[in-house]
Amino acid sequence: MIVTLLTILIAINCILLTLVILIQNPKGGGVDSTFGGQGANQMFGAAKSTDFVEKLTWGLSISLFVLCIITAIIVNSSAGGALGGLQSEM
């Protein structure tokens, strides 16, 4: 049950990370700076929107890494008991 939940969270995180990366442009003129026209730039400012997207990218990347490590630990601990039982029977 918990592994299924973690797998779903990893999938959602991957989709969001993909979308956030596609918004960015390495030269700073990506979709995020032109999305919404002048209203978005006046409300948030171009620099603030790129900072937000960059922080969101780092946050999603770190959370994906942590979720994968936690899932691997849980799967390994639950499979370790089953494998240990099989090896002792042989």
Image (cartoon, helix red, strand yellow):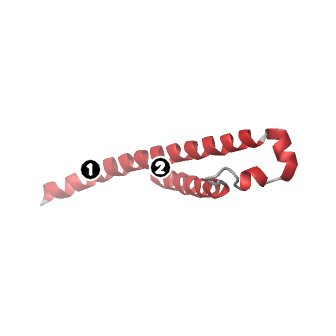
- Judged from the image, the secondary structure of the residue bearing numbered disc 1 is helix
28 and 51: which is toward the camera: 28
Q: Quadrant of residue 88?
A: bottom left
- Judged from the image, the secondary structure of the residue bearing numbered disc 2 is helix
Q: Is residue 56 left or right of residue 64?
A: right
- Give the Cα separation between the discs numbered 1 and 2: 17 Å
Label 1, on which residue?
A: 81
Q: Residue furthest front?
A: 27
Image coords of residue 10 (percent x, y): 52, 53
Image coords of residue 69 (percent x, y): 40, 46
**For the point 56% across and 43% down, which residue is it?**
58
The dot on residue 41 is none
**For the point 83% across and 46% down, which residue is it?**
40
Q: Is residue 49 left or right of residue 71?
A: right
Q: Quadrant of residue 49?
A: top right
Q: Residues within 10 Å of mark 1 (few under 14, many from 20)?
A: few
